[in-house]
Image: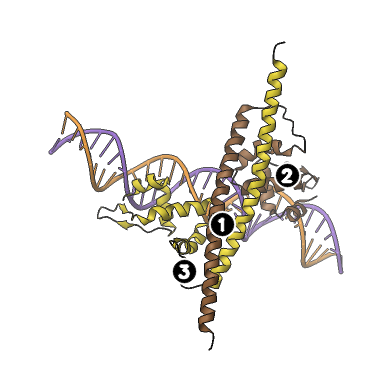
Chain colours: A yellow, B brown, C orange, D purple
DNA sequence: GCAAACCTTGACATCACTGTAACGTTGCCT
DNA sequence: AGGCAACGTTACAGTGATGTCAAGGTTTGC
């Protein structure tokens, strides 16, 4: 498929698809006219890349991780590089930290919003004609 | 306290403290010699800023949110600006989304690491002298 | 009084986008 | 066949948060 279709299916703008290619995360074929030609399996791959970037993992590291996350179901690791394992553990722990933080701020915001709503309520009530 | 001490206590590099000031998130006093002088309460504030930035909130929006999150215990909202409420809800929802994503990838990574460990185990066993 | 440690501003670099300009290709309609 | 919209291409510039470094002033400790 061409870049536009992939963009639609992954909800990742074409601009970024080209960027990921520049960063070596995907390497589509080329048609004779120079258009990029994307294989089906890249749909999943792009979604994965987005997820990882959203989790704060830099492209450089994503490049190392992608082959790992490609494993379909039964995960069998060919070459259990201990250095890569270290990297993955570190990143996972950082993810966990970020989650905890997010949770905290999420909660704080929710409370504040609730307080705002109560305040709006009160204002309405006090303004009610008697 | 001076910028170095604040940096140490918050684990935020001095570069960033100056940047946050540039963005209007903190406004320290100045000593006669031009050195920045930070009040105690800024320690918490800076930590909050970091947390929010780590959650993916841009400084522009943090500026609007900070007064809200400052509320000590009993949250009372003076001026319940509905536009601000909208903003907060949007950001909170985005936070929730990001949390879900993080959780998913965290889980995937954990599984992969476990698979690596099993693989290492197997290798070790198969290599064990009989 | 001198060096190390700290502070100042300013400039340039990086990373992940994001926008836009300038231009080529394809598909469709009349 | 002409024309035009939709789609593709590269290339360069800008942004936001951050890193790094240079050149210089201030403080502190020996």
Residue A45 can be seen in this image: yes
- What residue sits right under mark 3 in the picture? A76
Badges 3 and 2, same chain: no
The residue lying furthest to the bottom in this view is: B130
Q: Badge 1 local density, few (<14 within 10 Å), some, or many (20+)?
A: many
Nearer to the camera, B13 or A121? A121
Q: Distance between the residues labelled 3 and 2?
A: 46 Å
**Vertical comparison of A103 with B72: above or below:** below
Q: Given the image, what chain letter belongs to the residue carrying mark 2?
A: B
Closer to the eye: label 1 or 2: 1
- What residue sits right under mark 1 in the picture? B106
Which quadrant holds the C terminus of chain A? Answer: top right
Q: Badge 2 local density, few (<14 within 10 Å), some, or many (20+)?
A: some
- What residue sits right under mark 2 in the picture? B45
> Which secondary structure lies at badge 1?
helix
Q: Is residue B44 left or right of residue D21?
A: right
The residue lying furthest to the top in this view is: A130
Q: Is residue B127 left or right of residue B64?
A: left
Q: Given the image, what chain letter belongs to the residue carrying mark 1?
A: B
Badges 1 and 2, same chain: yes
Tell whether label 2 touches label 1 (CB within 8 Å).
Answer: no
Q: Residue B63 carries which label?
A: none
Nearer to the camera, B60 or A130? A130
**Vertical comparison of B16 with C21: above or below:** below
Tell whether label 1 touches label 3 (CB within 8 Å).
Answer: no
């Amino acid at each position: 498929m061409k870049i536009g279709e992939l963009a639609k299916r992954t909800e990742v703008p074409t601009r970024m698809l080209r960027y990921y290619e520049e960063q070596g995360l995907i390497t589509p074929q080329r048609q004779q006219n120079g258009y990029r030609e994307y294989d089906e399996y890249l749909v999943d791959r792009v979604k994965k890349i987005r997820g990882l970037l959203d989790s704060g993992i830099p492209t450089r590291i994503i490049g190392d991780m992608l082959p790992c996350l490609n494993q379909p179901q039964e995960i069998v690791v060919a070459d259990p590089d201990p250095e890569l394992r270290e990297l993955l553990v570190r990143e996972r722990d950082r993810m966990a930290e970020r989650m905890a933080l997010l949770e905290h701020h999420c909660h704080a915001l929710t409370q504040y919003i609730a307080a705002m709503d109560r305040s709006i309520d009160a204002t309405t009530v006090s303004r009610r004609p008697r």
